[in-house]
Structures are given as structure tokens and as C-alpha cells.
Image: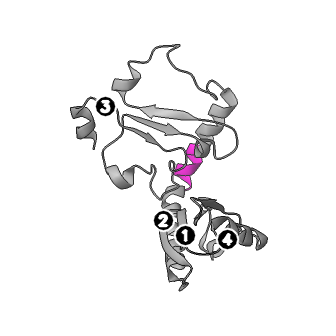
């Protein structure tokens, strides 16, 4: 992929706002598809501060970063000392507490539990780490929002996406007992 981008002089940019920092069972979601290749720019948010403060950021190659001069860029949450301190602590915690590895392990368990359901309602289960989508058949008289509301009434917060899919994204620190 990166070789193709270089051939045509195009930057490879990945959006890891939802999928970065362990959510998919790898440090970055792009690792599933790019392997050892690294994008020229990676966008980050949400998990970078552990959900404590609003923080966003980018990672970029030296080649890209050396073209950016002061005043060339901006950030909604840039330059916030508290946000940066929280982000540093959150990333340190992510590494020291093996949250990426936990996401991978617990994600496999979650995937196995969902695929074990023998339900004519379920079309497909897709997951990477603790980022899981259960897609329901599209010809049902109900959609993902209905299922999400039923789950909420039973104490489980989820989100419907694309009408017939319900997303499950438990905390990266979840253990097997809590998952069950």
C-alpha cells in the first residue's frame, strides 16, 4: 500500500480516532491491514487521554513533520498542558497494564461468544479486539436501534451503526468475568 502511495506521490493517512491505541487488539488498527508498514500520518483522539480530557493528535513521519512550520497547522485541543499530561499518563498506563494484549485476548472471547449464538436474527459477527459489530438481517421488522434499546433496558450500553449493526466496545481493562 505504502509503495503504491509513494509511486503516485500520495500520502497514506489513517484515521485511528476510534480504532487506535488498543481498541482492535493491536496498538493501531492499521496494523491489521498494513502489517509492518507505517502510514505517513496517523490521526488520534478519544483513547489518547483515556476518555478523561479532550485530546487529539497526529503521528507522522519525519519527512512529513519537517515540512510543517509553526503556524502551518492548528488543533482544536492543541497546547493544553493538562490534556498533554493526561494523555502521557493514559498511554503509559495502556502500555504498563498490557491493555492492548488484554483487548486481543478478551476480543477473541467476545467474538467466540457472539458467534456461538444460534440465532436466525444474526447475519454476521465482525470483530477485531474489543471492537465488535453484530449485524442483524436487514429484512427484520426491527433494526439495530431497537436492539440497542433492549440491551440498554437490560443494563448494557451499546450503539447501533448503519441501521442493522450493533457495536460493542467494552473498556480495554475488562476481564473475563465482566465479559461473561
Q: What is the C-alpha distance between the residues marked 1 and 4?
A: 10 Å
Give the image quarter of residue 165. bottom right
As for residue 101 lying within the magenta part, the answer is no
Q: Which residue is mark 2?
A: 127
Q: Residue at x 48, y 60 (%)?
A: 101
Q: Residue at x 34, y 32 (%)?
A: 11
Q: What is the C-alpha distance between the residues marked 2 and 3?
A: 30 Å
Closer-to-camera residue (79/10): 10
Residue 147 marker: 4
Q: Is residue 98 visible?
A: no
Give the image quarter of residue 55. top right
Tell me, what colour scheme is on the image?
A: one colour
Vertical placement of residue 35 versus 108, above or below: above
Across and down, in percent, residue 113 comes to: 54, 78
Answer yes or no: do the residues labelled 1 and 4 have beta carbons within 8 Å?
A: no
N-terminal-most mark, 4 or 3:
3
N-terminal-most mark, 2 or 3:
3
Q: Does dot 4 land on a helix, a strand or a loop?
A: helix
Q: Which residue is mark 3?
A: 10
Q: Does dot 3 land on a helix, a strand or a loop?
A: loop
N-terminal-most mark, 1 or 4:
1
Q: Is residue 99 left or right of residue 147?
A: left
N-terminal-most mark, 1 or 2:
2
Q: Which residue is mark 1?
A: 134
Q: Residue at x 55, y 84 (%)?
A: 119
Q: Does dot 1 land on a helix, a strand or a loop?
A: strand
Which image quarter is the C terminus in?
bottom right
Magenta span: 91-97
Closer-to-camera residue (136/102): 136
Amino acid at each position: 500500500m505504502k509503495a503504491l502511495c509513494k509511486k503516485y506521490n500520495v500520502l497514506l493517512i489513517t484515521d485511528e480516532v476510534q480504532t487506535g491505541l488498543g481498541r482492535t487488539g493491536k496498538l493501531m488498527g492499521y496494523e491489521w491491514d498494513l502489517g509492518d508498514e507505517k502510514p505517513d500520518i496517523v490521526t488520534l483522539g478519544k483513547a489518547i487521554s483515556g476518555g478523561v480530557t479532550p485530546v487529539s493528535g497526529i503521528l507522522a513521519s519525519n519527512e512529513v513533520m519537517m515540512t510543517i512550520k509553526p503556524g502551518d497547522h492548528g488543533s482544536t485541543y492543541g497546547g493544553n498542558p493538562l490534556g498533554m499530561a493526561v494523555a502521557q499518563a493514559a498511554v503509559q498506563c495502556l502500555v504498563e497494564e498490557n491493555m492492548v494484549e488484554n483487548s486481543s485476548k478478551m476480543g477473541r472471547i467476545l467474538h467466540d461468544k457472539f458467534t456461538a449464538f444460534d440465532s436466525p436474527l444474526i447475519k454476521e459477527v465482525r470483530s477485531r479486539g474489543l471492537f465488535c459489530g453484530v449485524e442483524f438481517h436487514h429484512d427484520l421488522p426491527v433494526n439495530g436501534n431497537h436492539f440497542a434499546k433492549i440491551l440498554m433496558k437490560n443494563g448494557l450500553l451499546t450503539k447501533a451503526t448503519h441501521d442493522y449493526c450493533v457495536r460493542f466496545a467494552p473498556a480495554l481493562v475488562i476481564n473475563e468475568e465482566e465479559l461473561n
